[in-house]
Image (tube, coloured by chain):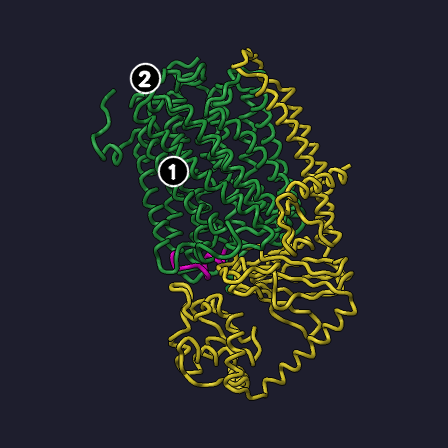
Chain colours: A green, B yellow
Amino acid sequence: MAHGPQPGFKRWLYTTNHKDIGSMYLWFSFAMFLLGGCMALVIRAELFEPGLQIVQPEFFNQMTTMHGLIMVFGAVMPAFVGLANWMIPMMIGAPDMALPRMNNWSFWILPFAFTMLASTLFMEGGAPNFGWTFYAPLSTEYAPPSVTFFIFSIHIMGASSIMGAINIIATILNMRAPGMTLMKMPLFVWTWLITAYLLIAVMPVLAGVVTMMLMDIHFGTSFFSAAGGGDPVLFQHVFWFFGHPEVYIMILPAFGIVSAIIPTFARKPLFGYSSMVYATASIAFLSFIVWAHHMFTVGMPIAGELFFMYATMLIAVPTGVKVFNWVSTMFRGSMSFETPMLFSVAFVILFTIGGFSGLMLAIAPADFQYHDTYFVVAHFHYVLVPGAIFSITAGVYYWLPKWTGNMYNETMGKVHFWLAFIGLNLTFFPMHFVGLAGMPRRIPDYALQFADFNQIASMGAFLFGAAQLVFLFNVIRTVQGGRKATDKVWENPEGLEWTVPSPAPYHTFSTPPAVR
Amino acid sequence: MLRGFNRLFALLATSVPAHFALAEEGAERWGVNMTQGVTEVSRTTYDLHMLIFWICVVIGVLVFGVMFYSMWRHRKSKGYRASQFHESTAVELVWTIIPTLILVAMAVPATKTLYDIYDTGEADLDIMITGYQWKWKYDYLGADVSFFSNLSTPRAQIDNQLPKGPDYLLEVDEPLVVPVGKKIRFLMTANDVIHAWWVPELAVKRDAIPGFINEAWTRIEEPGIYRGQCAELCGKDHGFMPIVVKAVPEAEYTAWLGERAEAAAKARELTEKTFTFDELYAQGEKVYNRTCAACHQPNGQGVPGAFPAIAGSKIATGPLEGHLNMVINGSQKNPAMQAFGEQLSEVDLAAVITYQRNAFGNDMGDTVQPIDILNFKNKQ
């Protein structure tokens, strides 16, 4: 215990402490979650009824674009980095992250990136309006002038992610306590190690593609302009080479969280630890060879379609292994359903439903009917909201007593869960139906036959949004006080984080713990 | 077996919401499933979709069944003692190999269907489809027929000032007319950004990409009107560029083709005619609302920062030459301002330019005749 935090705001500005930085990441991501959520509510409010009521199409497109960008880069990714910061050193028995100053830097550039991105809403011509996938040439020759600011903010977010990933790899590979062999690491550490490699592999590709856009827009190149001899489809290949691993970046750490929570509340060890590790690695490998399944309709040769179809279907195998393992862990356990477990069980069920629609989308000929419809919107929200968001929420409830030393309010936690669960399903389940019935995505107005289900979805979205305020309130109350948590918090949880006092002291494991 | 299940599903899907259905004319509400469509490919696609759906349902029932049973029986509150079994290579192998086999079973019919969809050879008829912001252009290759297809839903319906019609947002001024029973090959491209031409009942969806020509085909079995929409985000009015395909018996199609060719010839004759200001102004207003209003707005005020105003604009109130050049050749600076010289007839160009110079408070008082347009084009 050399020294404690600096007083006042300097504590947060200058901090190199993994716990402080973890907290800042988590609060930042929650702020972005609310901002991106408000944009989603604008979208849902406009889609409540056919006709244009609240916003005009150009602003609607800015909302869908910013909602996607903010949720992916501002809410989900920083939340996982925040959890990694808090938990990885404590799980492997390290005193801090390997590169603490870089850790500070990789957080503090994020608020600037997102301020820049959000400021485009107030610029002439408006914010980016070309979808979060920003397909050229809509995002180059036809983009509003603010696209340049969008490119720079993506660069900064990418730099932040790469630094965070380097830090996590360096920490895991170098700072494990003696005896903590790779195959003894908690699954959250394993999944983050693999995620960090994915980040290092693909964030530079994203940086590359936005730089090519920048060159096309300002420096007279024609990477993506057919008129100049370029290729608009090239954009999609490069983007999705980043984009598909990116979706696994947003789900692999979730697997780790749920694999920690289910055994605790089933009071039974995880069924197949090593097969979970191998399954995660297989999913990561496959993520690099399936990107063009996002592009089945661009007119690839049939050999390409078949390759990407088969490779994509294969992902179902390791993903299935994971689901079967979770279910087997629950089977003949002694289960109780505290809030983290509720969110984790919902994760398994709803993520599996998202996996089923993913399998359907993998079938190229059927995908011609699904592609770019609300069926796709339903699919990726079913994997991202109950997948990423629910697992993050579960993780926060699970570790919050360790962080704050106080138990959260269980009743309020359950209310949050049921509101979110019902809201989520009301919002996204009907989207399967309207998608199959023929409603394209990213439209501000729609034909009359889609009206009823859209109305249900809009009501569900507001319920889901309201549920998050319960969460915010519960977390704030827990930070302020509440029933004291024991050091173990739960009945018999596994992991080094439960061997330190609650709340975890500012510095933990200054001397490495003994690992059996 | 599968068909039986599908029928059951269709029955459940339609009967349950029937209680709520307000039986809207024309539109089938509470639609929950993919259309079976009107082509062989669309039916095969539907069958494939349902096959995978039911496989997923069966797997889901098994997995969730075990899970819910476990959550019901194996609870701490019921005093259930946890067993401690874990790790079994045999079990892991089983649940790796069985799903792999199921996947192979899915891949076989999918591959077959894909080969069918890709077989674009030996077509009876070729139609070139070009996506524009925000309309479709259809060229009947080998026939002298080519036209644009625009949304025909009145602006007032979109703005909730008039009740919405049954085909709200799914209606166009000029549908794509095709014969039934013929193999039609579509060649797709785009003029500006990427669009995607999609008609669910034909199970045809292909991206229309500038600089590329994609192929697709269909053979429609029943005469009828089939509606679709652009499926790829293409800017502001992406939601407002529908597709309407009118499939008719071959004789009717041939007659229609003849009429169109005649009409085209007549339109060319009109180029020689001199119109009055009022005729041009009235026609110009129509053309403006169809072609220009999406960006420059019905009131000519544009959208600040994105689309310039026509009202009081330097070009629309400046020398005629500059105005003609902008409309006919498009903008050098902003690609969103397309070259309308090839999109509109000389009459429509003359009308819309006359309109722009004299509407929204612009008061140039001049009249542009079709022959002026022709002369301008010939000079270039």
Which chain is disc 1 placed on? A
Q: Which residues are magenta?
A: A136-146
Q: Position of residue A473 (x, y in %)?
A: 36, 32
Q: Amino acid at mark 2?
A: Thr
Q: Where is A208 relative to B323, above or below?
A: above
Q: Where is A430 relative to A445, above or below?
A: above
Residue denoted by label 2? A511
Asked whether residue A454 is drawn in magenta, I would say no
Q: Amino acid at mark 1?
A: Ser
Prevailing secondary structure class for the magenta stretch in the rendered image? loop
Label number found at residue A475: none
Residue denoted by label 1? A29
* Residue in front for this viewpoint, A175 or A404: A404
Few, some or many C-alpha atoms within 10 Å of disc 2 (few <14, some 14-19, many ≥20)? few
* Residue in front for this viewpoint, B101 or A265: A265
- Secondary structure under tag 1 reads helix
Question: Is A100 displayed left or right of B41 in the figure?
Answer: left
Establish whether labels 1 and 2 are both on one chain.
yes
Residues marked 1 and 2 touching at CB (< 8 Å) = no
Q: Nearer the viewer, mark 1 or mark 2?
A: 1
- Secondary structure under tag 2 reads loop
* Residue in front for this viewpoint, A237 or A120: A120
Q: Position of residue A392 (x, y in %)?
A: 44, 31
